[in-house]
Every structure is written in structure tokens, then in C-alpha cells.
Image (cartoon, grey):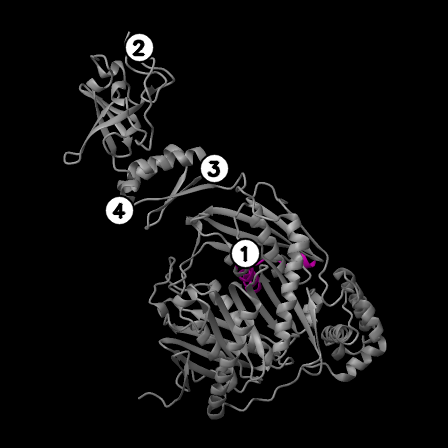
Amino acid sequence: MSKDYKSFSIELAGRTLTADIGRVAAQANAAAFMHYGDTTVLSTITASEKPRDGIDFFPLSVEYEEKMYAAGKMPGGFNKREGKPSENAVLTSRVIDRPMRPLFPKDYRNDVTISNLVLSVDPECSPELTAMIGSAIAAAISDIPFNGPCATTQIGLLDGTFIVNPSDTQAASSDLKLTVASTREKVIMIEAGANEVPEAVMIEAIYLADSINKKLIDFIDMIVKECGKQKHEYTSCSIPEEFFEAIKNIVSPQDMEEAVFTDEKQIREANIKSLKAKLEESFADNEEWLALLDEAIYQYQKKTVRKMILKDKKRPDGRQMNQIRKLSAEVDIIPRVHGSAMFTRGQTQICNIATLAPLSDSQRLDGLNAEETAKRYMHHYNFPSYSVGETKVSRGPGRREIGHGALAERALIPVLPDETEFPYAIRTVSETFESNGSTSMASTCASCMSLMAAGVPIKKMVAGISCGLVTGENDDEYVLLTDIQGLEDFFGDMDFKVTGTRDGITAIQMDIKIHGLTREIVEGAIETCRQARIFIMDTCMEPCIDKPRPEIGEFAPKIEMITIDPAKIGDVVGKQGKVINKIIEETGVKIDIDDDGKVSVFGPDRQMIFKAIEIIKSIVTDIEEGMIFKGKVVRIAEFGAFIELAPNKDGMLHISKISEKRIDRVEDVLDIGDEVTVKVMEVDNVRGRISLSMRPSDFEDTPETGGHRHKGHAVEGRDDGISRDLPHNRRKGGHNKKRQ
């Protein structure tokens, strides 16, 4: 008999969302067994009994686990077992983390883990959204201190109409992929990718989602009322007030202002190091306070910077509130790559390299979404320790690197050319040379310029900028900061990143440390970012490179694409790949053929590419009477020669059709391997025979329709009946063979 549990349901975007409480995972601190349509996710939360020693942050871990069985798939790879999280799983974990983290107490040091296990996927109901709601429910009903609940809604845009919580199919063709999390009063998280959606439309979509979130929060409140646990007490890890007072007696607020007031990160760090040494000397006999000194100095800096900005209207580097740091840009900084650009904003410097490859090099996605099977454009972001003057061994990309790369990727996807227009897979890599805030937005700018330098015909220029925030005691007391540096990010309340063209937004990512933003702040931040990104394009990016180069770079692979009848694909490939391999061997190109008949031919030599295309065309073109071909002698018999018109397509050239004059032996005129121009005289489809001729008289009055391999010409200057320099001659070392 199944155990008793409580079930709560709500209609959400025309589908039923259900949370089962107490049904499974009873040993977790709290668990919500979530159902949205047929999508099923188990969301749990657990916390350690005691705080972790020696840390100055809240240790929250969020996991989103994709199991292939949820979509009826077998995992790839040798082991047939799920390995490290997919990029989508990492990004989903980050989206769950960002709105929930600010709602836990800042001085809470117990380890907390939120886990989401995807058990079943309904293409109509997003498992990511289900996990977001489930995580919020689990945290709200647990005994872990949490100032929630929060709720999340997704918005799509199809044909100018907003779609609430779109299905996979709807999301795939949507002009907007927006995720908004809210508390009872305010918006707390925004994540978006968009096809140049105007600012006004984006704001409307955000607050449509917010209105739905309010209903979801009422639903969660009902669950908490019936199933919620009493929040447990915890030991605060805040700095004692008397310690702050003792520090101020040694390092005055004026001293701290002078220490942090500089636009050079290295100078500021040196100043703080000097103050720390002074304090360590003063508190040498107080081990308890010494253990808290780093956190105390951090808090002192934070209070100083926030007071300077909010009260004195003064930024640490002396800029105006809406002023962007010094900008510079250059292209072609790296030789031999397909495209490169460097973008510098203050002490943030990104070098981006673009690489072009055939579509077969697109990234294959093995995930739960059946609509997403491949990725043609990839943006990767690297953040080495030297970029911030630190020493650390690289362990590969972490969640932050994956998140920053995905944001810049979303920013540029809307302006990329279609595959038919530009049949390349594209990879851009952002190498962080120097970092002092907003590297992801610098990556967007650098990537855009490197694509243009590589000759990728992007539709419009894209730039990105980050807007910061410092708030006071109430909602009306705040300052927006354009282009935040690292210090303003660390000590501020918001990192609001927006990318876009002159005409609209392509991506948004909003991180905050407070319990939400008013609509006034959201609208102000979006407008601030619009003005800033246009300024960046006008004053920095366009003077460097204002449009894509007309041709791809010297070292990029050349690609041509044709479309053939899918029924003829087998003819091009041949038995066991013999035909296509022969073409590749002969021309040195690479050939990709899609099931729909799209053929991509690529290689370093454009002449060889066109030669391969001509061969493919000859294979798929039905041979008809009157066509003229340039073929190769592949076999000689007493009665004539066999001419290869195309792979697996031979024609018979009778000895009587070789010349106007009588020939005793075929070998007197032709050798195996000779190239000759022939005309199709007859096609017998029943017996599979093709009769050819090389006689000049048969070429007379031939209309220029013929063969896609060669056109007919008038014949002049014959001596022995075979022209030496006209299309119907044979080619072998520049001479014709004649028996002496």
C-alpha cells in the first residue's frame, strides 16, 4: 500500500502542475515530486547540521540532473551511462541558483544542496521550468532559513503573440526565450534570448511573466501553510559590531575611501594590502578577531564603496554614473586564424578568435529536447588565472565559463546568416587577457568583430554592456551604474547584462543580491544598456570594422553547396563509398551529404571544389542524346573504346565514330587514360547503353545546351580528322597520338 501524501495542483498555461509532498524522498529535508503534464521532476533540498568552518560565503550547490531514460533515449558513449552534466544542465542549474541564492541569509554558512532529478519529459512541458518551481517549493517547505518563496515563468513570442510556458516546438521557432523569476513584490531574475525584440516588448513580456509568478507564489504559500516546517535557528557568522568599531579607530573611513578610490585595480589591491598589514599588527594579540579580519575588511570596503556611490555620487574610478570606461578595438591581431579581434574596456580585455568549418563539424547535442539535436554556432569563453593576476592550475571550464560563453552565444545567434547563405559551422573563442568586470559583454563585442573580420555575413552589429545598481534604505533610493567594474560588481546589488543591435535586444542576463527589483529599476536598466551599447558601436566597434568582409579569410576552408535529388545520393556515394572516395582522392576535397540532398564540398583549393561539384553533377544528371561530355578512356576493345562520362557511367565510342577517316586500330588514336570530348548520339535505357561519337561532323550545329561538362564548338583546321585544340580533342601530355 502506498504511503499517504498530500497533492496540490494548479492550472498553468493550459496544463496541470502538480506537487506531491511526502510521497518520495522522505529522508531529504524537503522534497517536491513535481508533475507538469507528463514531465516529472524530483526536487529536493538538504542542509548540513553545522556551518562549514573557514569560509566567508553561503555554500549553496544546485544540481539539475538529466537522465536519458526521461526522453526514452540510451546514453551515448562506450559506458552507456550519463557522465558529466551537459551544457544545458549546467545553465539550468545556474538559472535555478540565481533567484534563490539572495533569499537565503547572507550569514548562513551551512552547506545547502538543491537537487533536481528529471525522470520524465513531456515535450509540451519544460523540465527546466518544472525544476525551477520544484526547487522553490522544496526550499519553502523545508526548515532551512529561506526568505521565499519565489516562482518562475517562461515566455515565448510567436507571430507577435506572447506564449506562456511554450512547448519545445513553440520554443524552437519563437522570437523570444524569456525566463523570469519573482518574489511576492519584485522581479528577482531575468534570462533571455531574443531575435532583436524591442525594449518595450521585452518589458511587457517580463511583467506578463511576473503577473503569473504572483499566482504561483499564492499556490506555493498554500503548500507551505499545510506542509511547511518551522525554520530552524542558526548561528550567525556576521562580524561583531565592536570589531568594526575597533577597525575604524585604526583605519578611518577617509583612509578606506582613499584606498579604494582609483581606476587601477592593482593600485587598489596594494592599498588594501597595506591597510590589512596595519590591522594585523594592531590585532596581533586577538586571534579571534584576526580570523575574521579578511571578511571584516571586505565588509568595510563594501560599506565605503556603497556610501561613496549612493550618498556622494562618486564612483571608485572617478567616472560619472553613466560613463563607460575607455574603449579600444582592433582586428586581425592573430595571424593565420580565420578571424580575430580584440576588445578592451578599461582593464577588461578580450581577444576573440573565429574558426570556420563545414557543417559536419557542428556540435551534436545528446539531450532531452528532441528539437535541439545540433548546434551550428558555438561560443566558448576562457578565464585564465593570469587575467586577474592570480596563480591557479587550469581545470577546464567551470560553470561560470560555460554560462558566460552561452550568454555571448545567445547574443549573436539572431544575426548569423542562414546555412544556405553561409554553409559553415562557426566557433568563436573568447580568451580573457585581462579582467576587471563585465568580461561576458566584452566577449560579445569581440566575437561580433571577429566574425566580421572572418567574412561571416552577419546581418547587424551586436554589442553588450552591463548595468549595476546600488540601493539605499527604500525602493526610491538607488543609483544605476553604466559599465560596472569588478569592485562595483562585488559590492553592488545587481549585474544587469544586455546585448543587442541598434534595433532590439538579443540577450539578457540579470544577477542580483537583493530581494528583487522594482519596475522602475528594470526599465531604467534596460534603457541605460540600450544607450550604452549604441555608444560602443558608434565610437569603438564601427571605426574598427563597420561591416563583414566580402570574402572569407585566406586560411579559412572554401565551401560550395549544391542540392541534388535525394534519390540520387546512393549514386554519388557508390557501393561501400567507392564513388565518393574516388572523387575525394581525385580532388582533395571533403564532401558532406545530408539526407535532404544538400551537398557541401569544401577544401583549400576552390578550383578542386568546382571540379568535384562538376563530377557530382555529372553523376546525378540523366544523360540525354545530344549532350557533350569531356570523358576519360577507361577500356579499349577491338570495336571501340569505353569512355567514363561520370563515375559508374560509361559510354561506348565505336571505332567508326573516332574519326572522319578510317581507323584500323583504336590504339592508333587512343590510349587508356586519355581525356576526350564526346557527344552522346543515342541512349538505350532498356539495355543500359550509351553510344558516343568524337567525329567533328557530329558536333556541327550542336546547340549550346549540352552537357554540363562542355559545350559544342565549330570545328576548324582538321588534318587527320581530329582537332588538336578544340573541345573534341583528347588530352594527353599536350599532344595527339598518331601511328607512324
Q: Please, what secondary structure does the residue beneath circle 4 have?
A: helix
Q: Which label sits in the foreground, 1 or 3?
A: 3
Q: Who's the residue at 49% across and 80% down the image?
A: 212
Q: CA distance from mark 3 to mark 4?
A: 29 Å
Q: Please tell me how crowded label 3 is: few (under 14), some (14-19), or many (20+) other residues with Cα within 10 Å.
A: some
* Residue 342 lies in the magenta stretch: no
Nearer the observer: mark 3 or 4; the answer is 4
Q: Is residue 386 visible?
A: no
Q: How many marks?
A: 4
Residue tagged 4 = 567
Instruction: Assess disc 4: are there few (<14), some (14-19) or many (≥20) residues with their C-alpha within 10 Å of its C-alpha.
Output: few
Of the pair 383 and 53, the residue shown nearer to us: 383
Q: Position of residue 127 (x, y in %)?
A: 42, 72
Amino acid at dot 1? His
Q: Which residue is mark 3?
A: 604
The residue nearer to you, when weighing 68 against 550, is: 550
Q: Which mark is residue 380?
A: 1
Contact between marks 3 and 4 (CB within 8 A): the answer is: no
Amino acid under disc 4: Ala
Q: Earlier in the sequence, mark 2 or mark 4?
A: 4
Q: Which residues are magenta?
A: 387-409
Q: Quadrant of residue 670?
A: top left
Left or right placement of residue 487 versus residue 571 in this view:
right
Quarter of the image with the N terminus in it: bottom left
